[in-house]
Every structure is written in C-alpha cells, then in structure tokens.
Image: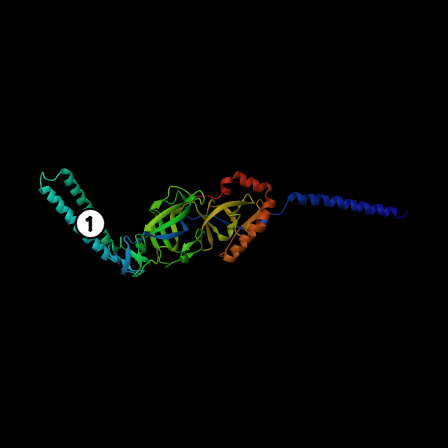
C-alpha cells in the first residue's frame, strides 16, 4: 500500500509525455517531405542547322549487260575488267565468215530478182501482169533477206552502246555464244544515282533541290539517324541535290524514296558502295540549348525534368544535335528551368529546391550509358511510383503542349 502513490505519479508523468509529443509528430507529418536540392540550368534559344543523316545506296546512272546478237565462236576480246570505253567502241568479235557467205549468197539472189523484173517489164504486153507481180515480190523478199544478213554481219562486231567502264567480262576467245549470251557488264560511272529511304515525318522538309552530302559510312562520326551524327573533316564527300521524290509512302517501312543524280568527281564513291547521305533541312528556329546531362533517354523518348512551381515535371523533347557538352533539343521553351544532374532519378511531382548549376562537365559516353541504364531502371520505377502525386499530374495536364516533343 505505501507504493501506490509512487505508481500514480509515474503513470501521470508518462501520460503527460505522450500528450506533449503527439502534437510534435503531427506537425512533422503535416509538413510533408523536405524539398530535394537540385541544380538547374536555363534553356537558351539556339537556332541550329537541321541535318538528317541516313544510310543510302549508290548505283550507276546507266548499266547494261552487253549480249551477243548472233551465233558463233568469239574470235577476239578487245576489253577487260575496268577498261574505259567510248560509244561505239569495239568490245569483241564473233567469227564473221558464215555471215559474209550468207551476204554474198543473198547478193546474187537480189541481182537475179532485179534482172527478172527488168526483163519482164521490157517485154511489154508479152508478160502477164501476174508474172510481173510475182517477180516484184521476189525482188522485195530478196532485198529484205539481204538487209537482215547485212545486219547480222555487222553484229559480229560487238560495240559499246554508250561511254563507260567495263564492270565484268564473261567470255574469252573461243567461247561459243548464241543470241542473248552475256558478254560484258557496262556501267556509265561518270554519273551516279543516290537512293535514300526517308522517314515519313520528314515529308514536308525533303523536297526536290534539298542539298545532300554523300560519303562512305566509315567517314561518319556516330550512327546514321543519330542526333549529332556528322561527316568527318577531309572525308572527300561529294555534293548533290535531291532530283526526285517518291509521291507515295511505303505502308510497311513508313518511309518514302528520294533520289539524287550527281558527279562523283573528286571522291572515292563508286556504284554499289554503302554510303551515308546528310540532308540539309534548313534552320531549326525553335531549338534550344541545354546541358547534355539534362537530357535522358527512356522508353524510346528523350526527356528532361523541368522545374515548375517548385515541383519536378517530366517533359518530352527531341534531341537533334550535340555540341561542346550541350544538347540541342526541340519541344522546350526558351527560359525553361531544367534539372541538370540526376534528372533520370527524380520522380515526377517531387518537390525540389533549385540552385543554378555552375561549371557543368562534358558528359562522356560512359556517363551517358549509366544515365540511360538508370533512367530505364530505377528512374522509371520511381516515376511510376510517384505518378499519382498531385503536383505532377497537375503540371502535365495543365500544360500538355510543353510535355510533348515537337515533331517536324
């Protein structure tokens, strides 16, 4: 019984402490998470040339397979692989003896037919009209046969149909050929035809007259279609302009074909080479410049994290080039504040406390890969978890135009 008062005093002390701490914990819960410190940079207007770099193929403007027109053995081959020829130059010869004999035979038949017609015409009314008509018909047939034999004799000499270079030789002296047997491949390599498959979203930009620079794929820095891909200096590129544009888009590849005919003089370009073509599509007046680390790639899209009303908001952009550690993007307004460090790891709707970034380092390839891996893994997971947050939904729904990448 003497301990009862002590128990009462202890119980009262514990009850008072509990009552005192409850308002403190409630205040902390009401205050919510503390803003996350981030470094930001301002997007600056930067008009930039828009260059579309795509894989392309080269073909000779004219290519033909020279074939035999008459039958017989090859007696002489006068050109070989790589030789340049002019129009009507002799390439090979087929034995002409049989065709000369045929011409001589038909010369005699033609002379006889002409003599018969003259004789019947000189007889006046003695010869019947029917006999005269038959003689004239034989004369016409003899002339036709003589003309055909003469052409076949001429075809024993194989000639170049146009100026160019020998791309392949298929016969040798002694080869017996028939009409249609391939003898040579001849290409006109002084003019080349460039063929490019262009994505349909550029249909309004690629037109007849669009300038193009063509070079070997090995001379390209980057990959075709990649932002910032460009032709290395001193690559010996050739200049051209689009001459034809297909009026239809392929329903399977969603591309349309364009062609350019140009002279490869001064370059190493040849028919059949795998090349790249850089199409100049003018200036991008709406492009802005931001630090390269501010742009990350996730789910097939380029994105930045904007700071709006103290909250991080995702924003889709289109990366068109990279220069000196900066990214040139479309779809972002000049003056926008973007997070430049660890943007891929910040969930949309996260409260942030921005400070101006200074001395941004140039991002390396390894840094970019790490940022990509993190953005596709933990970044997306965090973003999905925070998607229901009120500020993020509000920011994206109120300004949908800013959260969508601009397309040309």
Left/right of residue 228 with respect to residue 71 in the rendered view: right
Residue 233: percent from the left, percent from the top? 38, 58
Residue 41: percent from the left, percent from the top? 50, 50
Q: Is residue 345 visible?
A: no
Residue 354: percent from the left, percent from the top? 55, 49
Look at mark 1 in the image and give the residue it sits on: 146
In the rendered image of this protein, does residue 351 appear above or below residue 82? above
Q: Name the foreground residue: 251 vs 8.
A: 251
Identity of the residue furthest to the front in this view = 126
Residue in the image at 57% along x and 40% along y: 393
Instruction: Quarter of the image for the C terminus: give it.
Output: top left
Q: Name the foreground residue: 68 vs 271.
A: 68
Q: Name the foreground residue: 217 vs 187.
A: 187
Coloration mode? rainbow
Q: Name the foreground residue: 383 vs 112.
A: 112
Q: Residue 310 is drawn in which quadrant?
A: top right
Q: Is residue 114 visible?
A: yes
Residue in the image at 54% along x and 53% along y: 371
Residue 202: percent from the left, percent from the top? 41, 44
Left/right of residue 289 with respect to residue 63 in the rendered view: right
Give the SS element for disc 1: helix
Q: Residue 190 is drawn in which quadrant?
A: bottom left
């Amino acid at each position: 019984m003497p301990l009862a008062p002590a128990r009462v005093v202890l119980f009262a002390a514990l009850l008072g402490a509990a009552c005192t701490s409850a308002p403190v914990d409630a205040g902390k819960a009401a205050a919510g998470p503390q803003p996350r410190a981030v470094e930001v940079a301002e997007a600056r207007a930067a008009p930039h040339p828009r260059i579309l770099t795509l894989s392309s193929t080269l073909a000779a403007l004219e290519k033909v397979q020279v074939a035999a027109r008459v039958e017989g053995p090859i007696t002489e081959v006068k050109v070989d692989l790589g030789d340049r020829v002019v129009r009507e130059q002799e390439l090979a010869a087929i034995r002409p003896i049989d065709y000369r004999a045929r011409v001589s035979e038909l010369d005699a038949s033609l002379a006889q037919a002409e003599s018969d017609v003259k004789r019947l015409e000189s007889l006046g009314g003695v010869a019947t009209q029917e006999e005269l008509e038959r003689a004239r018909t034989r004369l016409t047939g003899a002339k036709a046969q003589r003309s055909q034999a003469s052409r076949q004799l001429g075809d024993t000499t194989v000639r170049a149909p146009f100026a160019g270079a020998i791309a392949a030789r298929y016969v040798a002296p002694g080869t017996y050929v028939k009409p249609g047997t391939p003898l040579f491949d001849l290409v006109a390599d002084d003019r080349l035809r460039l063929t490019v498959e262009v994505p349909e979203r550029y249909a309004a930009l690629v037109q007849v007259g669009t300038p193009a620079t063509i070079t070997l794929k090995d001379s390209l820095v980057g990959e075709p279609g990649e932002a910032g891909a460009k032709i290395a200096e001193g690559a010996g590129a050739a200049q051209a302009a689009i001459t034809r544009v297909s009026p239809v888009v392929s329903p399977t590849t969603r591309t349309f074909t364009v062609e350019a005919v140009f002279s490869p003089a001064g370059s190493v370009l040849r028919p059949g080479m795998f090349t790249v073509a850089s199409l100049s599509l003018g200036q991008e007046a709406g492009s802005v410049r931001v630090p390269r680390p501010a742009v990350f790639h996730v789910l097939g899209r380029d994105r930045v994290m904007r700071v709006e009303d103290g909250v991080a908001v995702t924003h889709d952009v289109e990366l068109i080039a990279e220069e000196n550690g900066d990214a040139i993007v479309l779809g972002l307004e000049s003056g926008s504040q973007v997070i430049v460090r660890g943007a891929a790891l910040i969930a949309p709707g996260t409260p942030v406390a921005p400070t101006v970034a200074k001395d941004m380092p140039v991002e390396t390839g390894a840094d970019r890969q790490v940022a990509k891996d993190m953005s596709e893994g933990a970044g997306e997971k965090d973003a999905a978890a925070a998607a229901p947050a009120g500020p993020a939904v509000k920011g994206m729904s109120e300004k949908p135009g800013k959260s969508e990448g601009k397309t040309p």
